[in-house]
Image: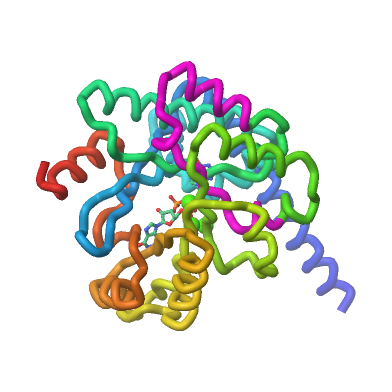
Amino acid sequence: AKRHGINRLQCFTARLQTQLEKSIRLEKGLRRALEHNECELYLQPKWNLCDQKIIGFEALLRWLEDEGGVKRFISPTEFIPVAEKTGLIIPLGEWVIYQACKLLKAWEAQGISHYPIAINVSPLQLKSGNFGASLKAILDEEGIPAHLLEIELTEETLVDIYSEDDNALEELEQIRSTGARISIDDFGTGYSSLKYLKHFPSDYLKIDKSFVSVEGMDSLAEPAICRAIVTMAESLGMQVIAEGIETDKQLQALTAIKCSMGQGYLIAKPMPAEQALLFAQNHNGM
Ligand code: C2E
Ligand code: CA
Ligand code: CA
Ligand code: CA
């Protein structure tokens, strides 16, 4: 039995070791990626479920790791946690804002200024103490109308801030005072009381994709929950965006409950910015 225990311990230590090595490797790589511009913003279209038109995009970070000429994509679900643990999320987050503004500016130069870009912001960025100010600085510097940049904060982030009640709340007010819109991301997964909602006047609620699609299922995963969220958002004066729409059935069910906007593989996956813009222009018949 003792022998067994030692084996298990060895096994456990080895696993820990591998995890540690992986996270150190990721951290190193991420630092290099930031220096060498190995990151890219992919854009996923958001569309109006009634008239089917593309109304904007969500920016999703992609890291193309270059390991001695061998390139591979690393998923944000893998590297964002490492970036958060190491504080790299701060420069990375700034890069994301800059990059989104650059795109908006380039589009404006082509006479296209009706597609807002939403960026994902981590709680650490909000807690860093100058997010609102630096956001405003970048918007001013680049001359971007604030309504074209949307900020997605997960429900978990908002609850976190709400319960700590530190100056992150001020940060939020500052974001709003720039005129940037705020979305509550992954709504319904934060296991929270709904009390915080009235303290954070936001513009959009995003129904988490787990309520919309489940692998191997065509129909809407949780119709009752989706309906409840739409009703609640309506009474709070917010608009709803459903994430993860993959099938026609889901689209129809969402339209039937008057969910007004959506994202998902049914219309398009996240793709490089140029391609995304072309897609939107073609799709909208412009
Ligand atoms: P999220 O903000 O909830 O983004 C939605 C995720 O769902 C994206 O995964 C997107 O590619 C995926 N998705 C979109 N449509 C569908 C669909 O129809 N079906 C399915 N199954 N999935 C769909 P992705 O790009 O891997 O990003 C994962 C998460 O990483 C994001 O979740 C967000 O929390 C985080 N993330 C991505 N970019 C950034 C960033 O620039 N900053 C921060 N702080 N986090 C980011
Ligand atoms: Ca998001
Ligand atoms: Ca989400
Ligand atoms: Ca998510």
**Residue 63: x %, y % from top left:** 45, 37
The answer to whether 156 is drawn above or below residue 211 in the figure is above
Q: Measuring from the top left, give residue 253's x and y in whole percent.
A: 31, 78
Residue at x 51% of width, y 43% of height: 151
Q: Quadrant of the N terminus?
A: bottom right
Instruction: Report whether 195 appears left or right of 149.
Output: right
Task: Give the left or right position of residue 162, taking residue 221 as reference.
Answer: right
Seen from this angle, which residue lies furthest top? Answer: 141
Residue at 15% across, 48% down: 284
Residue sitting at 28 percent across and 38 percent down? 114
Relative placement, left or right, of 250 versus 60 is left
Q: Position of residue 119 (x, y in %)?
A: 47, 41
Q: For the view shown, which residue lies furthest in the right direction?
A: 2
* 251 inside magenta stretch: no
Let me know if residue 66 appears in the view: no
Which of the 4 quarters of the picture holds residue 155?
Answer: bottom right
Q: Is the magenta stretch mostly helix, strand or loop?
A: helix
Marks counted in the figure total 0
- Magenta segment: 132-159
